[in-house]
Image (tube, grey):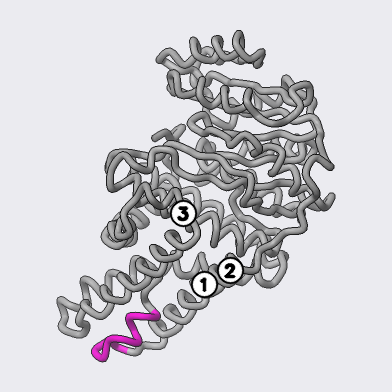
Amino acid sequence: MAACIVSIRISNVFSYHPVFAAYGAVVGALIIARYVFFALYNPPLLAPDVYQPEVAAIIPAKNESMGIYATARSLAEQDYPSEKLTVVLVNDGSTDDTGYWMDRAATDFGFKVIHLAENKGKRIAIAEGMKVHDAEVTALIDSDVQLDRDALREILRGFYSPRIAAICGHTDVQNADVNWLTKMQAQQYFIAFRTFRALEGHFRSVICCSGAFSVYRTSVLRGIMKQWLSQTFLGVKRTFGDDRGLTNLVLREGLETIYVPLARASTIVPETLSRYMAQQVRWRRSFIIEAIIGVRHMWRRPLGAAMAFYALLLVTSMAPFIVGYFLVIGPLTGHVNPVGYLIGLCLIVMLHQTFYWAFQLPPAKKVGFLALMPMLPMWIVASLLMLPWAMLTLGTRGWGTR
């Protein structure tokens, strides 16, 4: 996908069909725009500690074992007035010792704990947490995430306008140094947050306030909660894509969403290929569903945000056909030499790789300079197999874990 415009220029054997040319132009524009807005993005954040509302952090968990305790401890160590912070841990029917570690966190840190007798799904777990607090701001945090000490203070600086209803923090990877797969994901996360969300945030239209670490005005959250809980797709009740679904509802209300790079957290990413692929398929299902829903209202967003949204939807939808033609059908029929396309893909990956190393030191020391290169075959597999499979299984239900 990302390399089409480059590969078309460097290969003299490609068919210059208008569809391919248009696709390449859109992809090239998206890549350039993301890096341009990375450089331009500078939201007018409030001065530190100007806004210190009561905050409730809800952390739903299923089978996280002692990992939930580490997440809870990072909340207990926040550089934020303890009397203004409520933490609610929700045990969504775990079958391991997650409940024990939650109860220990309640004892050690004074947090609230809710134990659900059976697994209800992440959305229900969050809704249960909403019932036990009346804070002005609600933070939604994944159960495998640890926040930097000043994360809450930094993310609250983003409420510089009453129109801003949700703010996405920045998430890095905790276990980057485990193997080649986690090294690759460390760079994917950084690039996705610092370029994708910077572009969207510039227009106050972040399309996915990450479930890892985001905050919402509680009044807005309560206003859309009933609809969020009852969402269905193809007649099946939604049990995944909670963060995209929530953000989409906020945007549909005409409210604004931004990204605060200095509000930092870190998460555990999949360490095996099977778990990684399952996660990616799940994320693609969520993207497809929310994109279909978003088509009906994203045109009302600022022009830059609308153009980026529809362009991303276009290139994502076309990716299986483009990759299939240049790497499968074209070579088999003798119409295309795939080498040029693959070279173009490599150049794009190297561009992202260089960006990561230029702006993410010293964490970049955890990974080798070429650690992002596995993204090349992974993206090809995603386009040819995972994306079509996601489209065919949109009705699948599941909590979704690592």
Q: Is residue 368 above or below residue 139?
A: below
Q: Residues within 10 Å of mark 2 (few under 14, many from 20)?
A: many
The residue identified by callout 3 is 361
Amino acid type for the residue under numbered disc 1: Leu
Q: Quadrant of residue 38?
A: bottom right
Q: Quadrant of residue 20?
A: bottom left
Q: Please provide percent x and percent y for residue 82.
A: 74, 23
Tell me what residue is drawn at x 56 percent, y 52 percent: 290
Range drawn in magenta: 5-15
How much space separates mark 1 and mark 3, taking CA atoms?
25 Å
Amino acid type for the residue under numbered disc 3: Leu
Tell me what residue is drawn at x 27 percent, y 86 percent: 11
Q: Residues within 10 Å of mark 1 (few under 14, many from 20)?
A: many
Q: Nearer the viewer, mark 3 or mark 2?
A: 3
Asked whether the viewer can see residue 384, the reply is: no
Q: Nearer the viewer, mark 2 or mark 1?
A: 1
The residue identified by callout 2 is 308
Q: Please provide percent x and percent y for residue 27.
A: 46, 74
Tell me what residue is drawn at x 39 percent, y 35 percent: 402
Give the structural element (helix, strand or loop) at label 2: helix
Q: Nearer the viewer, residue 153 or 165?
A: 153
Q: Is residue 347 above or below residue 172?
A: below
Asked whether the viewer can see residue 363, the reply is: yes
Q: Residues within 10 Å of mark 3 (few under 14, many from 20)?
A: few
How much space separates mark 2 and mark 1, taking CA atoms?
7 Å
Amino acid type for the residue under numbered disc 2: Ala
In-image side of 337 versus 291 (left or right): left
The residue identified by callout 1 is 30
**Placement of the N terminus among the 4 image quadrants:** bottom left
Give the structural element (helix, strand or loop) at label 1: helix
* Tags 2 and 1 touching, CB below 8 Å: yes
